[in-house]
Image (tube, helix red, strand yellow):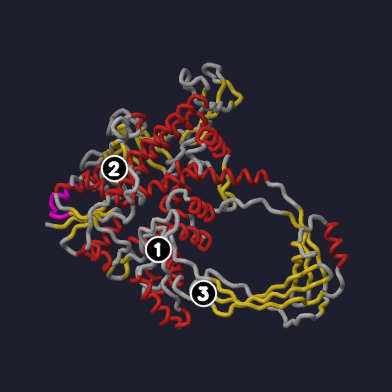
Amino acid sequence: MKKLVIVESPSKSKTIEQYLGSDYRVLSSKGHIRDLAISGVGGLGLDIENNFTPKYEIIKEKKKVVSELKKALKEADEVYLATDPDREGEAISWHLKETLSIGERPYKRVIFNEITRERVLDAFNHPRDIDFDLVSSQETRRILDRIIGFKLSKLLQNKIKSKSAGRVQSATLKIIVDKEKEIDAFVEEEYWNVTAKFKEFDAELSKFKNKKVALGNEQETDELLASLKEEFTVANVEEKERNRDTKLPFTTSSLQQEASTKLNFSSQKTMLIAQRLYEGIDLENETVGLITYMRTDSTRLSDTFSYPAIKFIEETYGAEYKGFVRKSKKTKNVQDAHEAVRPSSIYNTPEKLKKYLTKDEFNLYKLIYNRAIASLMKAARIRVKNVLFENNEAHFKATAQELVFDGYLKVYTYESVSTSELPDLTVGASLKPESVEKKQNFTKPPLRFSEARLIKEMEEQGIGRPSTYSQTITTLKKRKYVNLKEKKFIPTDQGKLTIEKLDEFFAQIISVDYTARMEKVLDDISTGNEEQTKIVSSFYTSFIPMVENANKNMEKLAPKFTGEDCPKCSSPMVFRNSRYGTFEACSNYPACKHIKTKDVERVQPVTTGVKCPKCGKGEIVERTAKKGKNNGKKFYACDNFPRCKNMLFGKPTGELCPKCGSLLITDKEDNVICQNTKECGYQKPE
């Protein structure tokens, strides 16, 4: 009998089965197999009166998967649950155990942070039980998100036609909307710069009368210029070296940010490619996971990677480049469940693997590989030279820098050091500039969020978790709450209205502070320091009165009138929205269900004069496909559709097949063949 292993991803199952051998059968659950039901009070799937006990049901699309897993389970002596090594993966293992009744036979939970032969086999040699604290944390998140999502979404759809709301989604939208308010409220201010231009360098005005320069208009600037003497005196020359410290290895968040700025990848694209690199790439005779698990908030690197990597650095680049193993410090909101995103093997260099990877896979893998290597290398050293000039009561400053030692920049070539030079100058020397120029400037409004900056803000504010950033941003776009302009997020009118109403009635729930505090509570549940029922009950009893108040007092958005009257009942016509876009309908709905149809010139089908042999009532006509991959192509079908769905693969000749009685048609090569070609195969002789 085989040992059954259940993982989440089909591609992962292929990789793992190679490592485990013929005694094991590896199948995939394809993610979650069940979710909260939509029954009970408010369709929440919760027994409110019984300690908010959740009620689950198998996801409709997963019934076939569950059936296949149950069948495989009957032939297995042992079961291994090898879903992803995070709270979501732990919950999926628990759902599999409950749904498949695995608890009635021996089962083991195995986790691995990288899909390589060594790590997978080691994980199977050290199984454990399901961590029910992690399951409880995930379940609490799902319950809270269901309560907020269902209640707020239904309310907003009814009142202001917004499509959805959510604990993390709405807090993120509020950040974008609040930034736009800052921009709208911004008032530009004038300021002036003064630059002394010497033959080999420039010096910027830094102080005047021992105060930081604040020239607010041209008159002040001209007065300062008039006070200057022709020659400038060198007051101080300072040279010093400073380090540019290496960057930490990637977390999910920093990976998404860096891939956005350096590779121009969206967060969604980054995570999809990282998933493939984690689950396994075919390398000649073996499939290998190239990176560790890509959902993490830790910058920790394991000793099993760090020490070989430092040795590799020494052998490849020289002893002067090797750094040290960093000791990660756990900070606020960091779970540190598994180590940073890194290559599974230091010896799988990007150049070695390039032929096995797509262009995007190679670029992302190279970024991850080089970042991990760089984190274990020495800092770069930069020599900085500052020269201070005096002229009457004005101070001017010139700066130059050069790279003394490239350090980690040797491999992390995504960064560079701009170099410049200053001539050898001695204190007391006098120099005459070629010119002294003034320039008018105006302060700029705050920058809108790019995707990278928004992810960074979400992380710093403690909104959501690394695994949720990409999906949250995708949802905001899909709901049309935000638009992208020059790769920056701008809230739409609907997005602004959504936050306005949520601020009015649910300010506590959608606040950044509340969302961050809730993440802390979920962390406490995952470590057994907080109790699920208590948290859910406390939230529900405070949230529902807010919903009831909003249902009663939130003003319903009036529909926009088209300026026309309904031709059926004379009521005003209004614009309405659906999943297919905007349409015009009668405002007297549901009493009047008139919808204005678009004036589309209908192309009449061309008759062939051949009676349909299938229904005996219709006639075969020539039509033109209007969508999909066959758009614009001719096809032949019965005009008695949809009662008769007879469709031909060629133009009918009007003759019947002498072999089976079906219609004869003309194919692409002008051969006359039987319509029932697969079973009959008749072709008329030339």
Name the spot of residue 72 as percent of width and height, x first. Answer: 17, 51
Q: Can residue 370 be found in the magenta stretch?
A: no
Label for residue 379? 3
Distance, label 1 to label 3, CA atoms, is 20 Å
The residue to which callout 1 is attached is 340
Label 3 SS: loop
Label 2 SS: strand
Name the spot of residue 46 as percent of width and height, x first. Answer: 32, 34
Foreground: 645 or 329? 329
Q: Tell which circle, 2 or 1, labels the residue nearer the N-terminal end.
A: 2
Name the kind of residue labelled 1 in the image. Ala
CA neighbours of label 2 inside 10 A, class few (<14), some (14 to 19), many (20+): some
CA neighbours of label 1 inside 10 A, class few (<14), some (14 to 19), many (20+): many
Distance, label 2 to label 1, CA atoms, is 30 Å
Depicted 565 relative to depicted 119: above or below: above
Name the spot of residue 620 as percent of width and height, x first. Answer: 35, 35
Q: Tell which circle, 2 or 3, labels the residue nearer the N-terminal end.
A: 2
Distance, label 2 to label 3, CA atoms, is 49 Å
Name the kind of residue labelled 2 in the image. Arg
The residue to which callout 2 is attached is 34
Name the spot of residue 610 as percent of width and height, x first. Answer: 34, 34
- Mark 2 in CB contact with mark 1 (< 8 angstroms): no
Label 1 SS: loop
Residue at 14% across, 47% down:
104
Residue at 20% across, 45% down:
100
Task: Read off the magenta span.
Answer: 70-78
**Quadrant of the frame with the N terminus:** bottom left
From the viewer's perspective, is 2 left or right of 654?
left
Q: Tell which circle, 1 or 3, labels the residue nearer the N-terminal end.
A: 1
From the viewer's perspective, is 111 left or right of 331?
left
